Amino acid sequence: MGKSGLDVSRIAFGTWQLGGDWGSFDEDAAVQAIQHARELGVNFFDTAQAYGFGKSEALLGRALRDELKRDRDSLVIATKGGINPGSDRPRDARRDWLRKGVDESLRHLGLDHIDLYQVHWPDPDTPAEETAQALQELVDAGKIRHVGVSNYDTAQLAAFDRTRPVETLQPPYHLFRRAIEDDPLPYCREHNIGVLVYSPLGSGLLTGALNPRTTFEPGDWRANSSAFQGANFQKNLEVVEQLKNLAAEKGATVSQLAIAWTLHQPGVHVAIVGARRARNIEDSVAAADLDLTGDDLARIEEITSRGVQVEGASPEGVA
């Protein structure tokens, strides 16, 4: 995966949905989903301190405990820190908060080192030099192996790079959210930065499971998002219906088509996909092997040009 040198599956199992921001879920079923992903060949698992402040990390550690004890090097565990949602400083990439976050993540995961540690969101009030130096110190201490960032633009990547090279970037990317194609994906390609994209299924929009009558639990962030309400929601659901037809021609589901599309984009190495149940991860893993021709990609472009670009959640709220 880029200059990191990490050897990872093209599908990473994401655990945002296991932190409480997506409504209720069955913990035992989630554990089974994680373990089934591993059985299917997934070796890359992504979580974050802010996903339930340890809840998601602890659940991931529990699910993978036996293999982590038996063969630690077979797994690549990524987590993120540097934010404090609900506080008076929701973005906090200062040295002390990062150090505290790494120690807490190690404890929750039950690990002695983290393979990839990422700054969850850029912090405009902390110099990039301080953040980069703090993470290099944690590498030197053996607590983390590789350093990445999430949700950074080109200018923020370059500022970080001046002190310590960025090895990976985790941006949002899907058929209804394509801003990274202009900034910062070209920078990542030029500087060999590994790119692991999150929300390739548009936070559920591209699963084919939603309809105009879909409602969300009060604890689900989508209940407060404009992307999942009104005319914009309706228009994008119509686009998804057309994508379903194209997917069916290829013997695939619309979610597989959406994931495969992200993996066909130059500079994208990995798609992060979450699942609450074992059966949900099977389609996602199979998507990595779905071949899309130039004609397929052109048809996808034509269909999605009728959609509405959407935003997502941030430490400050949802759009």
Image (cartoon, grey):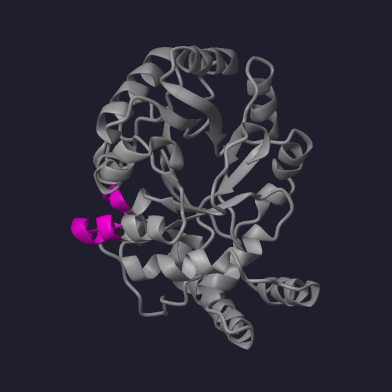
203 relative to 52 in the view: left or right? right
Is 27 magenta? The answer is: yes
Q: Residue 116: x and y, percent?
A: 49, 32
123 relative to 304 in the view: left or right? left
Residue at image coords 63%, 18%:
164
Residue at image coords 32%, 27%:
106
Q: Which quarter shows the N terminus?
A: top right
Q: Residue 98: x and y, percent?
A: 40, 20
Q: Is residue 291 above or below residue 125?
A: below
What residue occupies the far front of the structure in this picture? 70
Q: Is residue 247 above or below residue 232?
A: below
Q: Is residue 83 above or below residue 127?
A: below
Q: Magenta residues, as a range?
A: 18-32
Q: Residue 292: x and y, percent?
A: 70, 72
Front residue of this view, candidates 41 and 48: 41
Whether residue 202 is visible here, answered yes or no, is yes
Front residue of this view, candidates 21 and 31: 31
Is 160 magenta? The answer is: no
Q: Residue 67: x and y, percent?
A: 32, 44
Q: Quadrant of residue 258?
A: bottom right
Front residue of this view, candidates 152 and 140: 140
